[in-house]
Image (cartoon, rainbow, N blue to C red):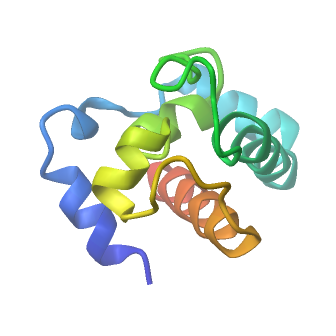
């Protein structure tokens, strides 16, 4: 289901440079994939889903958590990138379905990182 968008993202010079390193892979292994998915849901709900985000474009760190790296790789890091790549409008709170799509995309990218 996410193959087409992940293939498009992998052709982006910026998006394709993001990879999980051993540190992040070990974190995932230690915490478990369900915990990582829970973190992704929380990050999307609190940092991405609101209609207005005061620091939009700067709310997702480039490192520090596997989900943050995945968000940059999948263009789910800010509402501007989400609008450009996934066509969800800015200035409107994301629906539960849209949030689930973003979380599932993040998790698919993480799973593909091995």
Q: Quadrant of residue 42?
A: top right
Nearest the viewer among 55 and 104 is 55
Does 76 sit left or right of 102 as displayed? Answer: left
Residue lying at the far bottom of the rendered structure:
1
Q: Residue 102, how many percent across, how many down?
A: 58, 60
Does 16 sit left or right of 109 as displayed? Answer: left
Quadrant of the snapshot with the N terminus: bottom left
**Residue drawn at (85%, 49%) of the image:** 38
Q: Residue 106, how many percent across, how many down?
A: 56, 54
Q: Is residue 79 visible?
A: yes
Q: Residue 111, how many percent across, how many down?
A: 56, 58
**Residue drawn at (34%, 75%) of the image:** 3
Does 16 sit left or right of 29 as displayed? Answer: left
Q: Residue 110, how many percent across, how many down?
A: 54, 50
Q: Is residue 74 visible?
A: no
Nearest the viewer among 109 and 24 is 109
**Residue drawn at (73%, 29%) of the image:** 27
């Amino acid at each position: 289901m996410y193959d087409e968008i992940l293939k498009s993202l992998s052709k982006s010079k910026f998006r394709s440079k993001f990879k999980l390193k051993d540190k992040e892979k070990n974190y995932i292994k230690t915490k478990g994939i369900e915990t990582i998915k829970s973190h992704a849901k929380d990050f999307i709900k609190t940092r991405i889903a609101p209609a207005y985000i005061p620091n939009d474009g700067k709310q997702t760190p480039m490192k520090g958590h596997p989900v943050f790296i995945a968000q940059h790789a999948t263009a789910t890091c800010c509402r501007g990138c989400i609008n450009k790549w996934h066509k969800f409008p800015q200035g409107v709170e994301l629906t539960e379905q849209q949030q689930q799509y973003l979380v599932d995309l993040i998790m698919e990218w993480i799973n593909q990182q091995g």
